[in-house]
Structures are given as C-alpha cells and as structure tokens.
Image: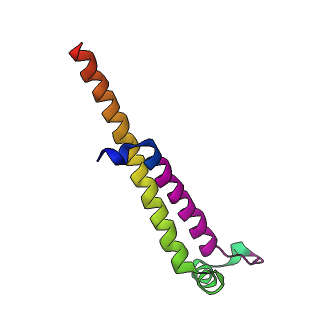
Amino acid sequence: MQVLFKKSTLVTTATIALMLLIIGFFLRALLIPIQDFHLLTEQQMKEAQLDYAVNYPLGSALMYAGFSFLFFVVILIVLKIIQSKTSLKKRDSVK
C-alpha cells in the first residue's frame, strides 16, 4: 500500500492520466471545419462526430479512463495528506 503513496507513483499516474485525456480528446474531436456549427441539433452533431472523428468510441473510452485515473490520483493525494497529518500528531504526542 505504501507504494501507492510514493511521489513518483503519483506523478507517473497523473502523467498517464493526462496523456490519456489528450489522446482521447484528439481521437474524439472533429478535426474538420463545420460552418454554422451552432445551427446543428444535438443529434446531427453526434452523427457528425461519429462519421468524421478519427475514432470516436476509442477517444471516449480513453477520456473516461483518463478521468478515472485522475480521480484515483486525487483520492491518493488526499489520503497521503491525511496520513502525513496523523503521523505528525502521533509523533508530537509521543514526545
């Protein structure tokens, strides 16, 4: 369990999460210009994304995985902060 709280593990996991988000965004995004973008209905926009995006389903999956990893890293950072504060209190009470 202590391996998860190492700074290098947290930085590596956060970096992987950001890479997944960036790659997922570019796979999901429409890279062709669309005139009168605001005039499209939500259904038409969804169809355009499915038709013209590089790989919409893979991009969505990578973005969800990236958000999951970031959520995991935030939880670990909060737990590390709580753990460090409780260990400081224990050291102070022992002295």
List the single residue furthest toward the bottom: 51
Quadrant of the frame with the C terminus: top left
The coloring applied to the image is: rainbow
Q: Which residue corresponds to the image point at 57% horizontal and 69% vertical from the top-left?
A: 24
In the drawing, does residue 55 fall left or right of residue 67?
right
Q: Which residue corresponds to the image point at 64% horizontal and 80% vertical from the top-left?
A: 53
Please say if 56 is above or below 2. below
Q: Which residue corresponds to the image point at 27% horizontal and 20% vertical from the top-left?
A: 91
Quadrant location of residue 93? top left
Task: Looking at the picture, tell me which residue is in the foreground, 71 or 41.
Answer: 71
Q: Is residue 30 magenta?
A: yes
In the drawing, does residue 79 fall left or right of residue 35?
left
Q: Which residues are magenta?
A: 11-36
Please say if 46 is above or below 83. below
In the drawing, does residue 77 fall left or right of residue 86?
right
User: Dominant secondary structure of the magenta stretch?
Assistant: helix
Residue 46: x percent and y percent?
A: 58, 80
Task: Looking at the picture, tell me which residue is in the foreground, 34 or 31.
Answer: 31
Task: Looking at the picture, tell me which residue is in the foreground, 33 or 85.
Answer: 85
List the single residue furthest toward the top: 95
Task: Looking at the picture, tell me which residue is in the foreground, 74 or 88.
Answer: 88
Residue 66: x percent and y percent?
A: 49, 62
Residue 3: x percent and y percent?
A: 35, 47
Residue 44: x percent and y percent?
A: 62, 83
Q: Is residue 74 magenta?
A: no
Please say if 58 is above or below 16. below
Q: Which residue corresponds to the image point at 38% horizontal and 40% vertical from the top-left?
A: 78
List the single residue furthest toward the left: 94
